[in-house]
Image (cartoon, helix red, strand yellow):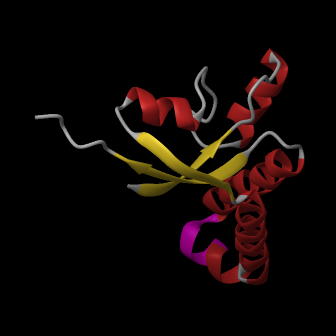
Amino acid sequence: MAGYVIHTPAGLSPAQAERATTWGPSYVTGPATPDELAQQAGFVVRERRDVTGEYRATSAAFLQARTELEAALRAAEGDAAFEAQRAQEEETLAGIDAGLLLRSLLVTEKPAPRP
C-alpha cells in the first residue's frame, strides 16, 4: 500500500505541537511517527520519502490560484468561506515554512500470513 501523510517532525515542544495543530489538518500531531503507526497496523514500511517540498509548492499554488480567482470565488463561496479557506492556506504555508508540517510518501506491505 502506498499513500501520502501529512505529519509533524519528532520531538516537538508542546507549544510547537499546538501551532502545528492550528496550522495543519486535524490530528496532525500525535505521539507516534507515520512509520510507527503503519507498523502498529501490521504493515512493514518499505520506503518513506520526504515530499515536503512538493507539498509546499502545491500549497503555494492553491493560495496563488485563490488570489487570482478571488472575485469569482467570493461570488461562489461567499466572503466568510473565502476568507476562512484563504486563512487556512496561509497557515498551512506558515507551518511548512516553520518546519512544523511535513509530508511523506509511505510505501508499505502487509506480510503474508504464515501457514
Q: Is residue 96 left or right of residue 103?
A: right
114 vs 98: above or below: above
Q: Is residue 114 left or right of residue 53?
A: left
75 vs 78: above or below: below
Q: In the rendered image, which quarter is residue 2 located in?
A: bottom left
The verdict on residue 26 being magenta is no
On-image quarter of the C terminus:
top left
Residue shown at 74% from the left, 41% from the top: 23
Bounds of the magenta segment: 74-78
Residue shown at 55% from the left, 75% from the top: 76
Please name whichever residue, 61 or 42, is drawn nearer the observer in this view of the structure: 42
Count of picture labels: 0
Residue shown at 83% from the left, 18% from the top: 13
Q: In the rendered image, which quarter is residue 69 located in?
A: bottom right
Dominant secondary-structure state across the stretch colored magenta: helix
Residue 30 spot, x, y in % from top left: 60, 24
Residue 65 spot, x, y in % from top left: 73, 79
